[in-house]
Image (cartoon, coloured by chain):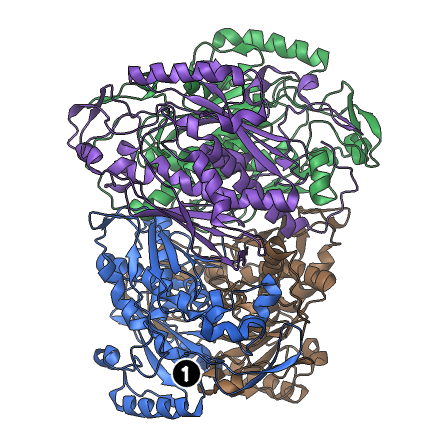
Chain colours: A purple, B green, C brown, D blue
Amino acid sequence: MSGNSIGKLFTVTSFGESHGPAIGCIVDGCPPGMVLTEADLQEDLDRRKPGTSRHTTQRREADEVKILSGVFEGKTTGTPIGLLIENTDQRSKDYSKIADTFRPGHADYSYQHKYGTRDYRGGGRSSARETAMRVAAGGIAKKYLKEQEGIEIRGYLSQLGPIKIEKVDWSIIDSNPFFCPDADKVAEMEAYMDALRKEGESIGARIEVVASNVPPGLGEPIFDRLDADLAHALMSINAVKGVEIGDGFDCIDSKGTQFRDEITPDGFLSNHAGGILGGISSGQQITAAIALKPTSSLRLPGRSINLRGEAIDVVTEGRHDPCVGIRATPIAEAMMAIVIMDHLLRHRAQNINVQSGLPVLR
Amino acid sequence: MSGNSIGKLFTVTSFGESHGPAIGCIVDGCPPGMVLTEADLQEDLDRRKPGTSRHTTQRREADEVKILSGVFEGKTTGTPIGLLIENTDQRSKDYSKIADTFRPGHADYSYQHKYGTRDYRGGGRSSARETAMRVAAGGIAKKYLKEQEGIEIRGYLSQLGPIKIEKVDWSIIDSNPFFCPDADKVAEMEAYMDALRKEGESIGARIEVVASNVPPGLGEPIFDRLDADLAHALMSINAVKGVEIGDGFDCIDSKGTQFRDEITPDGFLSNHAGGILGGISSGQQITAAIALKPTSSLRLPGRSINLRGEAIDVVTEGRHDPCVGIRATPIAEAMMAIVIMDHLLRHRAQNINVQSGLPVLR
Amino acid sequence: MSGNSIGKLFTVTSFGESHGPAIGCIVDGCPPGMVLTEADLQEDLDRRKPGTSRHTTQRREADEVKILSGVFEGKTTGTPIGLLIENTDQRSKDYSKIADTFRPGHADYSYQHKYGTRDYRGGGRSSARETAMRVAAGGIAKKYLKEQEGIEIRGYLSQLGPIKIEKVDWSIIDSNPFFCPDADKVAEMEAYMDALRKEGESIGARIEVVASNVPPGLGEPIFDRLDADLAHALMSINAVKGVEIGDGFDCIDSKGTQFRDEITPDGFLSNHAGGILGGISSGQQITAAIALKPTSSLRLPGRSINLRGEAIDVVTEGRHDPCVGIRATPIAEAMMAIVIMDHLLRHRAQNINVQSGLPVLR
Amino acid sequence: MSGNSIGKLFTVTSFGESHGPAIGCIVDGCPPGMVLTEADLQEDLDRRKPGTSRHTTQRREADEVKILSGVFEGKTTGTPIGLLIENTDQRSKDYSKIADTFRPGHADYSYQHKYGTRDYRGGGRSSARETAMRVAAGGIAKKYLKEQEGIEIRGYLSQLGPIKIEKVDWSIIDSNPFFCPDADKVAEMEAYMDALRKEGESIGARIEVVASNVPPGLGEPIFDRLDADLAHALMSINAVKGVEIGDGFDCIDSKGTQFRDEITPDGFLSNHAGGILGGISSGQQITAAIALKPTSSLRLPGRSINLRGEAIDVVTEGRHDPCVGIRATPIAEAMMAIVIMDHLLRHRAQNINVQSGLPVLR
């Protein structure tokens, strides 16, 4: 199985570089009979799209997705869905300077060691541009999960550098450029980002993703645990350095009586575990969080080496996100949707006839 | 590919329940010609083994591993290595009470929804007992990485509940029951654990794992990133709720100039990224951390339901680890070894002939 | 995914050498709740077992399978099923002579090139002994398919060297040592085999396998076609050199009007396609045939080379099947069962809710 | 792993329907640094292309392949190669009639049972049109194998209905419309096809594929045998009903002394095994053969049913190949190339450092 595929039954395989003619992916395993149009996928693509506010890269990409196969007369056929997005605003010249230099904190150096060559234009394959295909593919999973199982997957920015949100109002998330759920923090974030941009700096962020109405019983007990597959999928997003399920690292200083989520006939009394017990969904909300590092593409010079191993100063011109976390919310939602979709299909395969005899508690 | 397998080229597939006749695994993909004896694997198994101090479960398991295939005249043959450990100290009676009850915080409830049935003895398949096979399989990877590539993988306990270590002295890790690298904290941990045991409580922990001398270029740029695969493997360990690579969640409030690891001809100036750039090893130390929750198996009663959905109080008798994190260090080392081994083989497959033209920096 | 595994959702991973302590496998993906005992698997193992007539190798193996996991209180739990068979009658001395020689027509030479080493005792990993685990694993699939779907999988010997059967009487297949369905040919086969044994020669054979009551719709249209996966599984049996689906090679000189299986409301008018159309089951009987070469292990000397590349004469002492095809029928049944089981689970995953609106025709 | 992917390390994933906007595939795992242009792939695409003689379908497709990623400055980068071919000559009207009918001998009926729906235009996903992508992907493997390992993969038509070739002259294969290697048979084939076309009939064919200079040691001993993977890949070609390796079905009536390929210090004395021993390449030529059935798309009426299960007569208008085998040679070459490429990479992964100590014999 190839390194550019994810999922065993709902499989997404992607291709494409930042400055090639196009990026694309193949979504294999989507059940037949679901109504699907390009508009269904465009919505999340537009949420991720650059250039929608002054706080993200000014690169302008239409990010218009085309469905090339797997849909007939408006419905999925069960055959692979080919998706394509053409690259329109490339400006290779911006990047020509760094052809033989290695930007600190970027994949340039490790790439050169792996492949002995690289498409240096805009990071090539390691550009966050590739995540557009994840969002498109995840949109298919999201739609299926919503329509067939009532599963909803939503995310938000919970921290921007030093600024932590204090409340979650789902209704405002898409009405500000940060996917911030706390109306009182938006202005502060705006100001922080403006100052950061002047400074030429970048900053990290924290994103939360939540899946509701997931049926209990999805996952596997050992390696392909639902939480392990989520960790894999979320850590595979550019710039992510940490993943938490439920309370995550707060569990270290918790005691067993506090942390174990007690159960009553009316439901669970808490959800420290984040909706996953022993690698299998419990029916509670599945909650995960990720930490995204600050981008290393800065106009402030950084020390590095060139292809000849000589010391150089690297200044990254061009258009970059001062906080890559800002656009990451739809990507994290997409990855969670792909993982849950994959496990839903796996569950049907092995356990479709199972009667648990237990109530479904939330 | 089955849910009980991990790795694409170095593949470990495990089987076995806590109270069945035996547990075992198949290690497929180990190169031929490596000297391998049961003693090579027993060392780490003994580090993980229960009952070695008063701070772990008193269940006594010899955990003697047998090599059933794949080794001939003392060397690996390249064919699958079958490993088996017999269960000797089972005491099923300890568990019969909970046959139709669901322990809060355990896999019991989610298991019942997935399978409609479960081997309730000692958690059956979801028992941490299964991790013995991971340690045995990981021992093969560790030995190969050490001998063939000079790669060393070591871990330690960095936090036990509220007690954080302040220094890392590798020489003392195996000379205390906690894998604690800070001699000044051992007594404190002893006292804390004694009190905890009296209380009937359990506590969480934090483990760090480090891989040294990993060649640059291992990993993949998109889904099968080295960090993503590490996150998957580490999150698949029982009780783990969070995974960090390098600085992990500290990156949220870091600025780009601080976080990007600058490069000089003499080497990197820092390692915030944890030795992985763009999903590919940089040649620096690979550092990861995990958070383990407190076990939910307590003699202090917890509210739950039974198979009929009725409210009950659950008291867990039997022998349990008050801190499952204490024995997790060898398991985390094993999982990291399996992932790095898998990517080493994948690297050879695609990139064996690559000349990067770059110096290897640490 | 490892080279010793087959199946994506119903996955069998095997290990073990002819003269090691034991052979075994892990069956992952069996649905929970099926009654399963060792006796269920022993039946086919005994059909495959050597030494049951003078026409097969006189090696005596009890071939007693142990279920080590995945079954609790007599039923499958949905967790991996570990199976083990101990090697009892090994006689390594028989083989010591050929330690540094390469038997013509055997894997010895290609093995040495692949691994640079091999367990030369009885062919080591490439011994047909490994097929015992396939039969045991296939027995689980066979039982599930029979009980849950009414699918029956049966095979027979259709040709032994020059002797072709002329009719198929299912009732006599297990009452003669050849799995021959034509009572009139059994004596002829007995005589032929006796003469062959005196001569010191070996001979090839042809086996047919048939699956009945397979629901229409199992398979995939492109690479993972049901026929392609059957070809893979059947060609993976030791000594198989050819695979046919339906009429197989007879299709070359057939015309379209003869070959296309016409359909009426009462059913198909023929089954030249062997129950598979476009890689997907049609609901008709699935029919496949395999050709097995004569074994190369003969007491008649054969020219070869030794480890130093010198010309030598190889005489294979020890106990061998003069016609490996004789014992292959249960193995072919098992491989077909594993493939159909895998596709049944895959079908449930993606298409469980499909309503075709068509009658099921046979 | 998805049903539309083949290969574990050199992985091809395809998408697209006969009458959608485009077909395409992703080739993942190609090593970096190989010179690759669209012209390299176009050559074989043109050999497969329809409408090049009166003996194939008159559908006119330019079949111009575009490389969308994975190549930079004329060389492969090691990242996935996206390939796209636009459908230009579709004529959906030709097919509208059969929207609710099921052509006998086609995937229509089994498809409807699997998916409950289908893109009926030109067979949709089950159209042989998809094989264009296999040829393009196989072209990448062919080029790599040729340049890096000196491996050459070539095929030819060995039988057209009743007409069997009697000699193999590689030099003429591409100079006649049948890939026929016997100059004396070409006229006969021309006449036969002309008569067949007048009749409105179709006919089967037999193709041979040969790989030369394959290093010994490629393959696996158990399930992922080189011959088993070849059988899978070749049987996955539309209309193939049988696969042979080496002498194939002729082995049934062969004796051991005839069939075992004896070895001398100067080389093998025969190649009945077809270059594969125990699932692993021996270094001899790898030879395989496939049988292709006559197409079922005929203007001569055939009995079938419609979506309401009613009896109907099906007459297939439109443009079809009277012998699908005629265009299958480049497809068979491509599939063999993909399998050998995959095993070459797998060999490097596990056995790159192996020294066999044996001479390479042919």
The location of residue B312, given as percent across then percent down, is 83, 26
Corner quadrant of residue D245? bottom left
Answer yes or no: is residue D282 visible: yes
Instruction: Give the image location of residue C9, x and y in percent.
Output: 58, 53
Q: Nearer the viewer, residue B275 or A215?
A: A215
A255 shown above or below A82: above
Q: Nearer the viewer, residue B195 or B59?
A: B195
Q: Residue at x 30, y 68 (%)?
A: D62
Q: Is residue D228 left or right of residue D28?
A: right
Q: How many marks?
A: 1
Q: Secondary structure at mark 1?
A: loop
The chain under label 1 reads: D
Between residues D156 and A344, which one lies in front from this camera angle?
A344
Residue where numbered disc 1 is placed? D322
Question: Crowding near pointer 1: few (<14 within 10 Å), some, many (20+)?
Answer: many
* Whether residue B324 is situated above or below residue C11 in the rendered picture: above
| Residue D273 position within the rendered picture, expressed as x and y whole percent measured from the top left | 39, 72
Residue name at image x 38 percent, y 29 percent = B152
The part of the image, by quadrant, that contains residue A320 is: top left
D135 horizontally vs C8: left or right:
left
Image quarter in which the C terminus of chain A is found: top right
In the rendering, at what x and y percent does residue D140 appear? 29, 58
Residue C313 in sight in this render: no
Residue type highlighted by circle 1 = Pro
Reply above or below: B152 against C297: above
Q: Is residue A136 left or right of residue C8?
A: left
Look at 50% across and 38% down and name the residue there.
A334
